[in-house]
Amino acid sequence: MTDLAKTALELFQAAIDRADPAEALRAQLASSPLSELPDGGRNFILAVGKAAVPMMRAALEEIPDPAQALVITNPENKTDIPGATVLCGSHPVPDEASQAAGQAAIEMARSMSQNDRLIALISGGGSALMIAPAPGLSLSDKAEVNKLLLASGLEINDMNLIRQQLSDLKGGGLLRHAAPARVQAYILSDVIGDDLRAIASGPTVAPIGTRDAAREMMQRAGIWEQAPESVRALLSAPQQEESAPPAATNTLIGSNRYSLKAMMAKAADEGWAAKLITHRLVGDVQDAADVVIRAAQTAPAGKPVALVFGGETTVQIRGTGLGGRNQELALRVAQRADEIPGDWVFLSGGTDGRDGPTEAAGGLVTPDTWSRIRATDQDPDALLANNDSNAALAAADALVMTGGTGTNVADVQVFLRRG
C-alpha cells in the first residue's frame, strides 16, 4: 500500500471515529442530564438504526434499569446487550424481520403511560430496519416501493417524503403510538443538511410532505406506474385532516459535518493543505464524479493537497451487477484518471462500513486502477455499465473494507495529491 493510500484510509478512519455514537451520546447526557420523571414514571429506551447498539450501551450506562430497552439494528451490527432486547431488520430493503421489529416498537410505545418517558436513539438505516406499513398496504408493497426508490436516482429527502406516507411509524408515527408519554430523542444524522424529518424517515418529527406531494414525486421520477396498485390507491385517496404529532424533544448529537471537520483537522495536522469542497455531494454518481474531477483539476499545484467532500449520492441502476454508490463513484473517477494530473488517490466510503448490499465500505482508486482491472482480462467499461463496481474494484484490489462501524453519518470522500 502506498503512503497516499494509507493516509486516505487514516483520514477516513478519522471521520468514522468522530461519528462514534456512544461518545456523542455520553457527551450530550453529561452536558444536559435528563430531567426527573413524575412519581411512578418509567424510562423506556428504543434504539433504532445502524448505530443502535453503541447508543444503547451508552444509554444504559446513564439510565440503569429502564422499564424496557429495545434495540433494532442491522444483522452485521447485532450483538447481545445485557438488559436489552436486540432485534434485526433488513437493509436497504425491508423484510419480515423489519416488520416484526416495527411491531415490537409499536407495542412498547403503546404500553407507556402519561408519566413515562420514551428515550429514542435514532440513527441512519432505521427507515428500512423498523417498518409498519400504513393501513391497506402489505410488506411486499413497501419492499417493492423501496426497490423502486433505491433505483430511481431520487435524493434521500425525496425518498423519505414518499416512505413517510406509506408508514404507520415514520413522519411522527412513533409519537402518536407513545402518546401521552413524553419523548426525548437523540439523533445521529446520516442526512445531508441534517433535516430531522428525513433521518430514519423521522419517527419522532412531523412528516416532510403530504400524500399529494409523494404521488407527484413518484410521477416525476417515472416510478408511479411501476408501484403496486395498493400504493397508488393510498396516495391517490383524499387525505383527511390530521393533527400534528405530539411534541417531542429532538437533539442532534452527530452528523456528516462533524466528521468532515475531523478529516480536515487531521489532514492539516499532517501537513496537507486541506480544503472542504462541499458537504452536499449529492445526486447521481456521474454528476458527483464531475464535481470531484473539476476540484482535482483546479487544486493548486506544488504542495500536498487534501480535498474533502461529504454527502450521499445516488445510482441509476441499469444493470444486474453488485455495488454501491461509493464504489461506483470511485470507479467513475478511476475511469477518467487521465483527466487528473499528478500522483493521487481518491477514496469514497460510507461511514457505516457498508456500501449497498456488499461487504465493502467503498473504493480507493489511483491513476492506474483502470489499467489494473484490464490486466485481469476484465472489461471495466462493461462492468461499470452493468453497475458491477464491486467486481471491478475487487479486481484492482481497490475496495475499502472496514466491517460494520456501528455508526452512520452518510458518506465522505477525500482526494489526495502530493503536489
Image: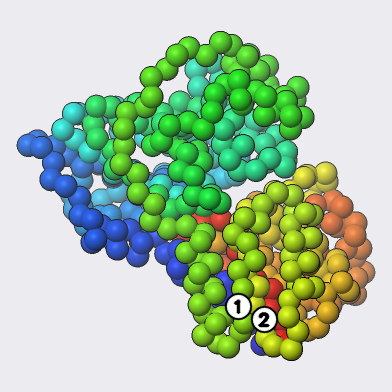
Residue bearing mark 1: 274
Front-lying residue, 287 or 9: 287
Answer whether labels 1 and 2 touch (C-beta < 8 Å). yes
In the rendered image, the vertical position of residue 383 relative to residue 401, given as above or below = above
Front-lying residue, 49 or 68: 49
- Picture coordinates of residue 382, whole percent (x, y): 90, 56
Residue 126: image tag: none
Q: Amino acid at mark 2?
A: Val
In the picture provided, is 17 more to the left or to the right than 90? left
Residue pushed farthest left?
39
Q: Residue at x 77, y 54 (%)?
A: 287
Q: Tell me which corner region of the image, top left, top right, bottom left or bottom right, holds residue 182.
A: top left
In the picture provided, is 144 more to the left or to the right than 262? right
Instruction: Look at the image and tell me whether residue 365 can be seen.
Output: no
Residue bearing mark 2: 305
Q: Amino acid at mark 1?
A: Ala
Q: Residue at x 49, y 44 (%)?
A: 195
Which mark sits nearer the N-terminus, 1 or 2? 1
In the picture provided, is 393 more to the left or to the right than 128? right
Q: Residues within 10 Å of mark 2 (few under 14, many from 20)?
A: many
Q: Tell me which corner region of the image, top left, top right, bottom left or bottom right, holds residue 140.
A: top right
- Picture coordinates of residue 295, whole percent (x, y): 74, 69
Q: Residues within 10 Å of mark 1 (few under 14, many from 20)?
A: many
- Picture coordinates of residue 23, whole percent (x, y): 35, 65
Q: Residue at x 67, y 52 (%)?
A: 282
Q: Residue at x 38, y 56 (%)?
A: 253
Label 1 secondary element: strand
Quadrant including the N terminus: bottom right
In the rendered image, the vertical position of residue 406 relative to residue 223, given as above or below = below
- Give the Cα distance between marks 1 and 2: 6 Å
- Picture coordinates of residue 169, whole percent (x, y): 44, 30
Front-lying residue, 78 or 6: 6
